[in-house]
């Protein structure tokens, strides 16, 4: 009987006290002979993947989109990057206009969201948006490091070229914004290299990558638009350091001919800002997301290896 009670892990005891009869059920957990079953996430969700269903949906969206973006030709990379620069420049136009009228950077940051909405709806490319989706795709072995470098370098150059053209046009078309452009640009480029400016650049890279993560966390366009507006408010409204956005403001100031700095000074500022943006985006968002989805990422890598092995094995047969 004692063995039966221990195996069934149950016993019942009774106590008599001032408050009446109190029953206590004592549970025994034997250390041997019993196998404890654990329900895995594969059994709890709608899919058989090792992460939650919502994360699986977001992961699948990122891999599908990243694979397409990373397999673009040079022509497509440069074209989408150029469009990205011009669309961000339209956001800068809205930013400078509201800042000139109100001197309120928070309202101006909301106005800048026009640029991010154009990027979202126009399907163009921004350099700092390439820190989450493309990196995750390369980590999943769905694209190569060379393709990632092509996307980054081509998009960066095209963003700056497209933005420079549009900012020259904007300064020509809106002379009243010239003084504001010089003032806003000086705020960034005259800032000394310090812990504060590095932190602002790290947060700038994190903010834009977090916006990308939020947009890939939902299928609803309303949610994607909300993420774009929120990202613009935080990034531009709080005047974080962002290598592309702030460079376009600086280009506008240089186009006026009244800027107290030149392109060499911009290049020096751009170097450390872009580097800190990359570190902030990759280290504070992308890396954590990869750690969170480690098991799912490993499955994707194994599936990619199997598909490559299968394609390699079929080549000799096709040749025969």
Image (cartoon, grey):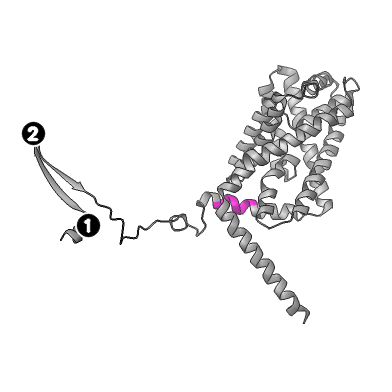
Q: What residue lies at 66% left-to-right and 45% top-to-bottom? A: 132
**Relative to 170, residue 13 above or below:** below
Identified at 46% across, 54% down, the residue is 41
Q: Is residue 129 left or right of residue 6?
A: right
Kindly report the secondary structure that dominates the magenta region of the rendered protein: helix
Q: Secondary structure at mark 2?
A: loop
Q: Secondary structure at mark 1?
A: helix
* Magenta stretch encompasses residue 147: no
Region rendered in magenta: 56-62
Residue 256, located in which quarter of the rendered image?
top right
Residue corresponding to mark 1 = 6
Instruction: Classify 10 Å Cα crowding around label 2: few (below 14), some (14-19), many (20 and above).
Output: few
User: Marks 2 and 1, Cα distance to the nearest angstrom?
Assistant: 31 Å
User: Residue placed at 62% from the left, 40% from the top?
Assistant: 285
Q: Which residue is mark 2?
A: 18
Front-lying residue, 264 or 235:
264
Mark 2 or mark 1: which comes first in sequence?
A: 1
Q: Does any portion of residue 198 appear in the rendered image?
A: yes
- Say which quarter of the image contains residue 90: top right
Q: Quadrant of the C terminus?
A: bottom right
Q: Residue 58 in magenta?
A: yes
Q: Position of residue 218 (x, y in %)?
A: 57, 45
């Amino acid at each position: 009987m004692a063995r039966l009670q221990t195996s069934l892990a149950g016993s019942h005891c009774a106590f008599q006290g001032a408050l009446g009869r109190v029953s206590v059920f004592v549970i025994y957990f034997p250390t041997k002979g019993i196998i404890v079953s654990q329900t895995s996430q594969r059994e709890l969700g709608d899919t058989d993947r090792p992460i939650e269903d919502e994360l699986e949906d977001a992961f699948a969206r990122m891999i599908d989109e990243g694979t397409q973006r990373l397999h673009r030709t040079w022509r497509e990379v440069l074209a989408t990057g150029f469009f990205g620069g011009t669309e961000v420049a339209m956001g800068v136009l809205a930013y400078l206009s509201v800042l000139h009228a109100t001197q309120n950077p928070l309202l101006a940051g909301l106005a800048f969201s026009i640029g991010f909405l154009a990027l979202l709806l126009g399907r163009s490319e921004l350099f700092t948006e390439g820190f989450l989706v493309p990196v995750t795709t390369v980590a999943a072995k769905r694209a190569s490091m060379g393709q990632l470098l092509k996307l980054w370098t081509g998009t960066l150059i095209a963003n700056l070229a497209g933005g420079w053209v549009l900012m020259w046009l904007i300064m020509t078309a809106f002379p009243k914004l010239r003084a504001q452009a010089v003032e806003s640009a000086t705020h960034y480029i005259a800032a000394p290299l310090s812990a504060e400016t590095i932190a602002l650049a790290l947060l700038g890279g994190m903010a834009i990558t977090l916006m990308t993560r939020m947009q890939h966390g939902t299928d609803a366009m309303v949610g994607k638009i909300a993420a774009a507006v929120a990202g613009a408010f935080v990034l531009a409204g709080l005047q974080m350091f962002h290598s592309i956005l702030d460079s376009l403001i600086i280009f506008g100031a240089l186009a006026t001919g009244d800027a107290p700095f030149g392109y060499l000074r911009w290049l020096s500022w751009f170097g450390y800002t872009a580097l800190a943006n990359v570190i902030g985006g990759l280290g504070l968002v992308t890396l954590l997301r990869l750690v969170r989805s480690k098991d799912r990422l490993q499955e994707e890598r194994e599936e990619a290896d199997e598909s490559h092995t299968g394609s390699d094995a079929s080549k000799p047969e096709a040749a025969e």
